[in-house]
Image (spheres, rainbow, N blue to C red):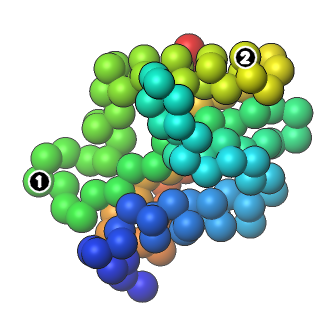
Amino acid sequence: MKINQNNAGLEAEKLAASYLVNHGLKLLAQNYHCRFGEIDLIMKDATTLVFVEIRLRTNNKFGRAGASITPQKQQKLILTAQHYLQQHGDCLYRFDAILINAVHVDHIEWVRNAFDA
């Protein structure tokens, strides 16, 4: 399976959401926006809220997908997650990453606790 380049981001999000649901997580929200940024997926894993960043790479010319989650991007995700928690109630949470290579989408790398707040 190869991801269509025209809708690559949307397809990667659908693929990631399906993958996580198949691994027992419950989808709560997609593309949560606030003034601080966006979170691709918000999932529930038992009693833990999971904020998921999805990274798709069509090649490794500029590094692997995980390398693109910079400290600046992490800070935006943390602020956006804090905003979500203020709106929906505080609970246990973590930040996960789904890393997808467009050439080999059958290989999805799920990084639990990709970084800390």
Task: Give the amino acid at mark 1.
Answer: Lys
Above or below, 104 against 33 in this view is below
Q: Which mark is residue 86?
A: 2
Q: Is residue 21 left or right of 57 when viewed as pictured?
A: right
Local packing at callout 1 (Cα closer than 10 Å; few below 14, some 14-19, many 20+) is few
In the rendered image, the residue lying farthest to the front is 35
Residue drawn at point x = 34 percent, y = 19 percent: 71
Q: Could one spot residue 1 in this view of the protein?
A: yes
Question: What residue is shown with label 1?
Answer: 61
Q: Which mark is residue 36?
A: none
Give the camera-side residue of 37 and 48: 37
Q: Name the secondary structure under disc 1.
A: loop
Task: Give the amino acid at mark 2.
Answer: Gln
Residue drawn at point x = 56 percent, y = 67 percent: 14
In the rendered image, the residue lying farthest to the right is 47
Residue 25: x and y in percent read 77, 52
Q: Name the secondary structure under disc 2.
A: helix
Residue 38: x and y in percent read 48, 36
Above or below, 31 against 17 in this view is above
Please tell me how many numbered marks the rendered image carries: 2
In the rendered image, the residue lying farthest to the bottom is 1
Residue 36: x and y in percent read 46, 23
In terms of image quadrants, where is residue 7?
bottom left
Q: Is residue 63 left or right of 55 when viewed as pictured?
A: left
Local packing at callout 2 (Cα closer than 10 Å; few below 14, some 14-19, many 20+) is few
Give the camera-side residue of 12 and 19: 12
* Viewport quadrant of the N terminus: bottom left
